[in-house]
């Protein structure tokens, strides 16, 4: 049974850093491509970072050079290191499989709020 538990969110000021974690219950996790998504208030959920099973990563332009996705295949964890946070990064953050659909299972997410 697939489960994702996201954690690490909080209230931060612009310019600060934060690391999100995702505990994944997923068969054959080590070979699955994973992603971090976020949904800002009033907006559609968007995929912001992806990582293959062997660690190759991609990012959307808005977070490139600020965010880093990583994973630990030994304990089924996915991470998102977020630096130089901006108010526009305020959203609920989710992890899931790459190409997860809206109708698929989603965890509860973790709220990140960036405000001065």
Image (tube, rainbow, N blue to C red):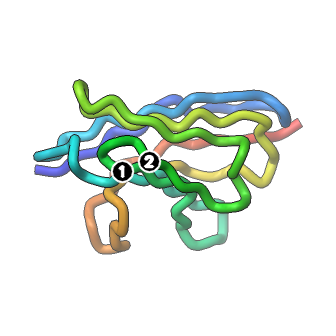
Q: Quadrant of residue 101?
A: bottom left
Rendering coords of residue 33 (x, y %)? 32, 54
- What residue sits 52% from the left and 29% below the top? 8
Q: Quadrant of residue 5?
A: top left
- What residue sits 52% from the left and 33% below the top? 20
Instruction: In this rendered view, identify the residue nearer to me: 95 or 108.
Output: 95
Quarter holding the C terminus?
A: top right
Instruction: In this rendered view, identify the residue nearer to me: 5 or 66.
Output: 66
SS for dot 1: loop
Rendering coords of residue 26 (x, y %)? 17, 45
Vertical relation: 32 (above or below) 98: above
**Mark 1 in CB contact with mark 2 (< 8 angstroms):** yes
Q: Give the residue at the far right of this rendering.
A: 116
Tell me the distance, in whole angstroms, between the alpha carbons under discs 1 and 2: 5 Å
- Left or right: 84 as drawn, with respect to 80: right
- What residue sits 57% from the left and 57% below the top? 48
Q: Which residue is mark 1?
A: 52
SS for dot 2: loop
Q: Return the mark for residue 56.
A: 2
- What residue sits 69% from the left and 52% below the top? 63
């Amino acid at each position: 049974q697939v489960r994702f538990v996201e954690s690490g969110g909080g209230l931060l000021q612009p310019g600060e850093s934060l690391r999100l974690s995702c505990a994944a219950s997923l068969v054959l996790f080590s070979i699955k491509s994973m992603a971090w998504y976020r949904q800002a208030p009033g907006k559609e959920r968007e995929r912001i970072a992806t990582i293959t099973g062997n660690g190759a990563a991609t990012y959307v332009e808005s977070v490139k050079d600020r965010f880093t996705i990583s994973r630990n295949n030994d304990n089924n964890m996915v991470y998102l290191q977020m630096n130089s946070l901006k108010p526009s990064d305020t959203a609920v953050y989710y992890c899931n499989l790459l190409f997860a659909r809206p109708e698929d299972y989603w965890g509860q997410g973790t709220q990140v709020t960036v405000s001065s």
